[in-house]
Amino acid sequence: MVKDTTVLTGKCHCGGVRFQATLSDGLHAVRRCNCSYCRMRGAVVASAEMGGVVILQGEEMLTSYRFNTGTAQHFFCSRCGIYTHHQRRSNPQQYGVNVACLEGISPFDFTEVPVMDGVNHTRDTGKPERRAGTLRFIAEE
């Protein structure tokens, strides 16, 4: 099976951090998570394999945050505070990329976004990854 890879550029809000992301399944597998951190952050993410996020500018402006097991590493701009991407806990060989940072993409472009169950994370339960629900966007006419 051939994957639908998509290469897009992105940036943080202030433009200090610019990057290129090679999305491993294009924009076909966007998702959210309901863990304590992601619930507060509220980002919709697409997937990129390790090496699929290349910082083009402002690497020195990126800072990171880890919590709980410390496996996941969340990157954000130290100037404007925008989360750009993170290394996943469920698959440390993969990144989640904030679609709101990608040029020409908005999280509101997706009418339905699966929400994964990060509260009952597969690494904690030993069970397969589970979908907690679906986030829907209905535009006003």
Image: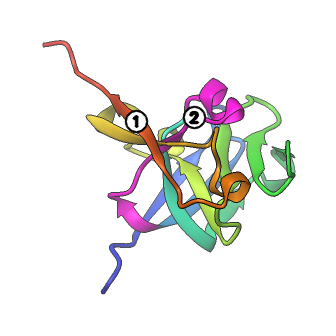
Magenta stretch?
Answer: 24-42
Against 63, residue 2 (above or below) is: below
Residue 36 forms part of the magenta stretch: yes
Numbered badge on residue 133: 1
Residue 96 showing in the rendered view: yes
Q: Sort mark 1 into few (<14), some (14-19) or many (20+) by Cα contacts within 10 Å.
A: some
Q: Mark 1 and 2 residues: CB-CB less than 8 Å, in contact?
A: yes
Residue with the most extreme top position: 140
Against 53, residue 119 (above or below) is: above
Residue with the most extreme left position: 141
Q: Nearer the viewer, residue 132 or 114?
A: 132
Q: Quadrant of residue 126?
A: bottom right
Which percent across, then down, holds residue 42? 56, 29
Residue 89 showing in the rendered view: no
Q: Say what secondary structure mark 2 lies in.
A: loop
Against 41, residue 65 (above or below) is: below
Numbered badge on residue 34: 2
